Image (cartoon, helix red, strand yellow):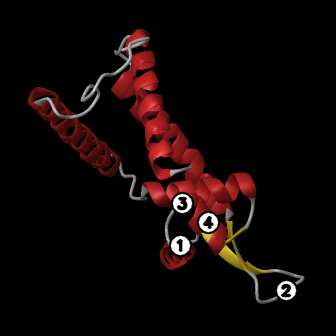
Amino acid sequence: MDGEEAGPGQGRLNDISKREEINQLEEVFRRFQKNINGVWNKRGIHISRTNVILLNRLQTEGPQKISALAEHLCITSGAVTGISDKLIEAGLAERSRSAEDRRIVYLGITEKGREILVELKERRQTLLNDLFGDIPQEDIQHLIELFRHLSDKAEKLTGE
């Protein structure tokens, strides 16, 4: 692969066995995600990844406008409003108005939201240790390289 030029049809999913392997990879990855969600739920963690990403953003960047959060999460403002309503109801986030322009509404994280993130970080670390603790370092490095390569390709395809 390294240093070789791809000829016509090379690197494409024209080969049936390669297509089957890619389909298997997709299925294994989907199963992995499903099982991770199951482990999270079994361990009493009932908060979505999107909610965690949003709370992390609020903690690191401070209060944000809904539109900025929507752009960061790559979802609609309406979806962020629905998520924020649930986070507010749970006491993890709060709305505030801009002092300069009362029409502008910000979403911020509460102390309870910060505490949840600390707890989740600890639980996440335990889960990662359980999952990857017995995998050799070179295999983990290879996974990182593969996912970085795939992420770079996906970014190019989306024009980002």
Q: Tell which circle, 3 or 2, labels the residue nearer the N-terminal end.
A: 3
Q: Is mark 3 on a helix, strand or loop?
A: helix
Q: Position of residue 4 (x, y in %)?
A: 38, 13
Looking at the rendered structure, the kind of residue marked 4 is Leu
The Cα–Cα distance between marks 3 and 1, rounded to whole angstroms, is: 9 Å
Looking at the rendered structure, the kind of residue marked 1 is Val
Looking at the rendered structure, the kind of residue marked 2 is Asp
The Cα–Cα distance between marks 4 and 2, rounded to whole angstroms, is: 19 Å
Which is nearer the eye, 104 or 14? 14
Q: Tell which circle, 1 or 2, labels the residue nearer the N-terminal end.
A: 1
Q: Tell which circle, 4 or 1, labels the residue nearer the N-terminal end.
A: 4
Q: Tell which circle, 4 or 2, labels the residue nearer the N-terminal end.
A: 4
Q: What element carries label 1?
A: helix
Which is nearer the eye, 73 or 88? 73
Are circles 3 and 2 on residues that touch, CB within 8 Å? no
For label 3, the residue is: 73
Numbered circle sitting on residue 123: none
Q: Quadrant of the N terminus?
A: top left
Q: Would you call the spot at circle 1 few (<14 residues within 10 Å), some (14-19), or many (20 or more)?
A: many
The Cα–Cα distance between marks 3 and 2, rounded to whole angstroms, is: 25 Å
Q: Residue at x 44, y 43 (%)?
A: 154
Numbered circle sitting on residue 69: 4
Direction from residue 109 to residue 47 in the image, left or right: left
Which is nearer the eye, 70 or 128? 70
Are circles 4 and 1 on residues that touch, CB within 8 Å? yes
For label 1, the residue is: 80
For label 2, the residue is: 101
Q: What element carries label 2?
A: loop
Q: Position of residue 53 (x, y in %)?
A: 54, 54
Q: Is residue 92 visible?
A: no
